[in-house]
Each structure stands twice: as C-alpha cells, then as structure tokens.
Image (cartoon, helix red, strand yellow):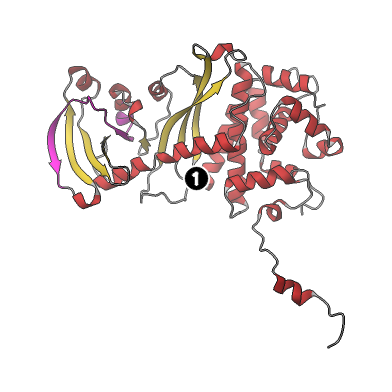
Amino acid sequence: MHAGTFVFAQLMEFFPRHEFHSCVRRYRGDRRPRGFSCRDQFLCLAFAQLTFRESLRDIVTCLRAVPTKLYHVGLRGRVSRSTLADANRNHDWRIYADFAQVLITRARELYAQDALAVELKQTVYALDSTTIDLCLSLFPWARFRRRKGAVKLHTLLDLRGNIPCFVRITHGKTHDVTVLDHLPIEPGAFYVMDRGYIDFARLYRVTIQNAFFVTRAKRNFNFTRRARRHVDKTTGLRSDQTIVLAGAKSFESYPQPLRRIAFYDTEQKRRLVFLTNNFTLPALTIAQLYKCRWQVELFFKWIKQNLRIKAFYGTSPNAVKTQVWIAISVYVLVAIVKRELRVNRPLSEILQILSLTLFEKTPLFEALSVKKEQTSETYRHTQLTLFDL
C-alpha cells in the first residue's frame, strides 16, 4: 500500500491535517505566507527534531540535499535560512500549541487502558517543571540570573502512556506553584506533586473541584492531630493520621481535614511525609502514588536527550515557544504511531530509526518492526551445493 511513498510522508499520514488548518485559521497564520506556510514550517522543524539538526543552516543544507523529494513529503515552499527564520519569528506559537493539544487528545485515547504501577481506575497526573538554560547575550528577554537566561517548562504528565497533557512555558523566575492557577482540574483525578507546590489556598481549589492531590509536607508544617489509623510497619509505613492545619492563615486557606502519612524509604534511607485529601485509598497506595511522580522527571530527561529543546533555532520568545511545542508534537505523534502500528520498540529507538529512514521508500511498519537476525543456520538451508558428495 505504501510502495513508493517516503517514510516521512507515511509518518505525516498520522498528522490530522484538517485540525491543523483550523489552528492556522484561528490565529491567521497564513495571512502573509510569502510562499512558506505554517505547514511548511512544521514539516521543517519536525524534520529537524527527527534527525537531530543543530541549526537553521543545518536544516536547510540537509533538506536542499534532497530537492526532488521535498514535494513528495508535503513541502511546498522554498526552503531557505531567512524564510525559516522569518517563520519562526512571525508565525504565532499558539498555532502549534493548539495543534499539540489535538495530538495529545488522540494519544490519551490510545493509551487510556494502559496499566499504572498502582492498581487504580482514576486518572493519575504528575506535575513538575524543568528549567531550560539560555545564553543571556542571545536571549536578553529571558534573564534568570546575573549572567544566565532560562525558561521553565511546566508539565502535567498523564501517567497512562506518559503523555504530557498540559504544558506551560514561562520565564525562568516564575515560581512553580503559580502554575496551579492555570491547571485544568479534572474531577476524580489524582494530582501528584512535590512540596514546591504547597499553597493551601491553591490546593483547596483542587479539593472543592472534587479532585485529589498527593504531595510532600514541609518540615515547618504546623498541624493538630484529630485521629490516627493502624499501619503495618513492615511495609515501611510509620503513621496514618487525620489532621487539621494549626496556623490561622493556613486554616483559613484550607479549612477541611487532611491526611498525613509517614513512610520510611529503606532504599534511600530517609523518612517521607505525605499530605493528601483522599481518605479512602490505603496508606501504602498513597506512598506508591508519590513514587510514580518520578515518571515526570524521567520524561524531562528523555525529551532533553532525544529532542531539540536545549539549543534553539531562533532567539525570539515566539521562536523558542514554537520549537518547544513542535518538539512536544513530534513526541506525541511518534507515541501515536507506536500504538497505532503496535510497534514493540521504545520511543528512543523509533526516533533513531526514523532519523535514518525518513527519505527511504520502506513501509513504515516494516521500518519500525523488530526483525529477527538471520542466523548461519538459515543461510545453510538456502545455500545451493556446488559439488555432489
């Protein structure tokens, strides 16, 4: 069915074109295309992400090396360094942010039945942020320290499939807890976060919207114990208490009881104290849920190693946000392809294969499938005999 079609073109068949054009029209992205549309820009930067290009000049040089193939993979505009730089500066980054949400919605549907490390029917999200360092002389708008620039990538990760369902790019000085003001709250879901997100007024908003949170308590945390439950200390649990906040301002911000669970981690040899507004799950399950938060740290490590979000192709805020959102779109698109084609490979291996095969005419499933190596025994069966014995 895909005979004669480039792998890049086959990959873009999973690209919902109608929804993309709706995003472009919403922000009037192609009102002055000058021969280089938003789709052309997306394809160029997706190519850069998939093949690990270092700069605009690198992207253009590689694409111009295969001029007869560009039309067949969907590129209609003339690829040049100045045209691509203008597109990164002028095409609204919100086009690619909205389109990434379209892909995220599709990916979450595909991974909705994946198992969690904890037996739980509800959706579990892990919230955290990572700092992306920038050169202050090139990005003066992103001043973070006296001689350093940075932006922050706040991410809410759906732990079923490790799909980033909410991403917010802010200045490096933005405090992590402020992202809770923009977080979409899903009733019945669990939000797992570290103690940097403790703000009882903001956490109370999660409670009144019928969602649950799991976080770590700070050391200077004042409370009054109301009740306690028996725990099995052989599992690492030390206590399971119902508490109320002791401080006047804290109690005014969060007037309802909380659950405090103490746990001793034998691997790290440290004592952890968790806070949650859920009183029905076993205490050990709450501790295991917090352990799942590490998945968002692994996600940040993965995208920094496998996608281009540490070095940027443009220096404007619009160019930086555009590149990050297209990188997220590529990550989610590859996750969709993996599930749709039922490919039994890690995403990192799929990216490595795509980096070498984008302009080959191999069926996509065949290129990504795990092939058994041909053994010497197989050669022996197919080898003709030269002399009769």
In this orientation, which residue lies closer to the viewer: 136 or 93? 136
In this orientation, which residue lies closer to the viewer: 275 or 306? 306
Q: Amino acid at mark 1?
A: Gly
Q: Is residue 121 left or right of residue 266?
A: right
Q: Can residue 164 be spotted in the picture?
A: no
Q: Residue at x 58, y 55 (%)?
A: 344
Magenta-tinted stretch: 205-230
Q: Is residue 118 left or right of residue 136?
A: left
- The quarter of the displayed image where residue 141 is located: top right
Against 105, residue 385 (above or below) is below
Q: Is residue 27 left or right of residue 157?
A: right
- The quarter of the displayed image where residue 259 is located: top left
Q: Can residue 251 be spotted in the picture?
A: yes
Q: Which residue is mark 1?
A: 161
Q: Position of residue 11 (x, y in %)?
A: 69, 44
Q: Residue at x 58, y 34 (%)?
A: 328
Against 313, residue 5 (above or below) is below
Q: Residue at x 18, y 20 (%)?
A: 247
- Numbered-mark total: 1
